[in-house]
Image (cartoon, rainbow, N blue to C red):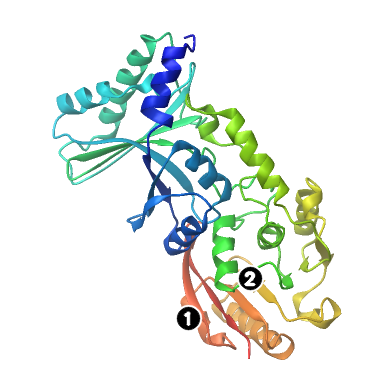
Amino acid sequence: MEITKSFEKRIKRRITGRKHVFFAVCAPGLKRLCQRELLKLPIKLENISMIKGGVEFTGFVHDCYFANLFLRSPSRIKMRITKFKAENFRTLEKKLKKIEWELYLQKNSVINYKVSTTHSRLFHKKAISDRAENIITNHLKQFGYAAKIDNKNNCHIIFIRGENNEFEISIDATGDLLHKRGIKKNVGKACLRENIAFGILSACKYSGREPFIDPMCGSGTFSLEACMIKQNIAPGFFRKFAFEKWQCFRKNRWNYFKKETEKAIIPKNKTEIFACDIDKNALLNLEKNISSSSFFSGIKVFHQDFFDLIPEKLTSDKGVIILNPPYGKRFQEKKQIKNFYTEINKKLKKDFKGWQAGIMFPEKNLLNTLCFSASLIPIFHGGLNIYAATGKIT
């Protein structure tokens, strides 16, 4: 379909010229942090409120660009298309047919449908998905569009959510989940997500102005995230987004945002981020990830056991230290892992007084090994319910 002036006017009138409701999906424990992030953005958003599963806000489409580019805590951002009540398939189909899908989706769009239902008369997910697919495909054909269905390539995700017979239709604005910053090409098993790392760094009061030590760094999630905070690098700076394939996408405006974001990056002046591990293969992966951009050259990577680490040899200032110890198959008995955490805390008490600390715990009962008064953050990671304890070592 040729993009005519009249079609451009329709897009402006119906999509870019109107305010829309957006939803930032958040992992458990990160909603309040996401709300704070949204309130700090230098754009005029309205109705920022925490709801089940995340944070909702109102703004223009280009505000959604900004949110994807700058937010560190959410997993995904969706744009609400419409909301309606439907107790039968006839009503559902009628409402879906009213949506001007050609204003949202480009020609030859790849579409994936995600359906969820709770306490609704229409509960069969595949039946709902099949009807939506048929309606959207036939609708787009009228405009010379071809829509491809692909459950692996999430170019466009249409979300259909039904609760108490109220259906909400949304389109994904993000693409790959937001924790994928576009940096870590080489990772180990069960790698911690960046948005969770950001939550723990925030709980440890890391601002980017103090030294940071990542002594069990693995593939370096904490170190890379700390480096981005320190140099004011937007978390979405290195990656692509789903909204770039929206019909209403304005490339010039997006390029302007990216250029202004690059201007705001703070050059490194001295090394204050230290990443070490006893696993040489993990360090090799981190070094490969760092080499992807000169922005990360301020991270000092070295091979060392945490128990041999002397902070004064790295920095004269107190800062933040976060540990994500190995657990699971490495320990054959619970007594072994408890002894390991006890030794970690003895080391912290001996050499890191005055530092802000964060420690990941696989089990809540290990918290009694802590050597400092801490706040507890519940985390769902790698299919496990784990915890992070944060506080100041005194």
Q: Residue, x 75% and y 76% (percent of image)?
A: 306
Residue 15 image-quadrant placement: top left
Taking 320 as reference, is 132 above or below it? Answer: above
Within 10 Å of disc 2 (Cα), the crowding (few <14, some 14-19, many 20+) is many
Q: Secondary structure at mark 2?
A: loop
Residue 322 in the figure: left or right of residue 310:
left
> From mark 2 to mark 1, how far is it between C-alphas?
27 Å
Seen as rendered, the residue at the extreme right is 313
Q: Residue, x 69% and y 88% (percent of image)?
A: 353
Residue 189 lies, in percent from the top left, at 63, 54
Looking at the rendered structure, the kind of residue marked 1 is Asn
Residue 223 image-quadrant placement: bottom right
> Closer to the camera, 124 or 291?
291
Within 10 Å of disc 1 (Cα), the crowding (few <14, some 14-19, many 20+) is few
Looking at the rendered structure, the kind of residue marked 2 is Tyr
Instruction: Say whether residue 53 is visible.
Output: yes
Taking 97 as reference, is 83 above or below it? Answer: below
Taking 2 as reference, is 36 above or below it? Answer: below
Residue 40 lies, in percent from the top left, at 51, 59
Residue 140 lies, in percent from the top left, at 38, 15
Q: Mark on residue 328?
A: none
Residue identifier under label 1: 365
Residue 261 lies, in percent from the top left, at 66, 46
Q: Mark on residue 206?
A: 2
Q: Residue, x 48% and y 65% (percent of image)?
A: 379
Q: Secondary structure at mark 1?
A: helix
Residue 207 in the figure: left or right of residue 274:
left
Q: Residue, x 22% and y 24% (percent of image)?
A: 93
> Closer to the camera, 131 or 107?
107
Which mark lies nearer to you, 2 or 1?
A: 2
> Closer to the camera, 249 or 162?
249
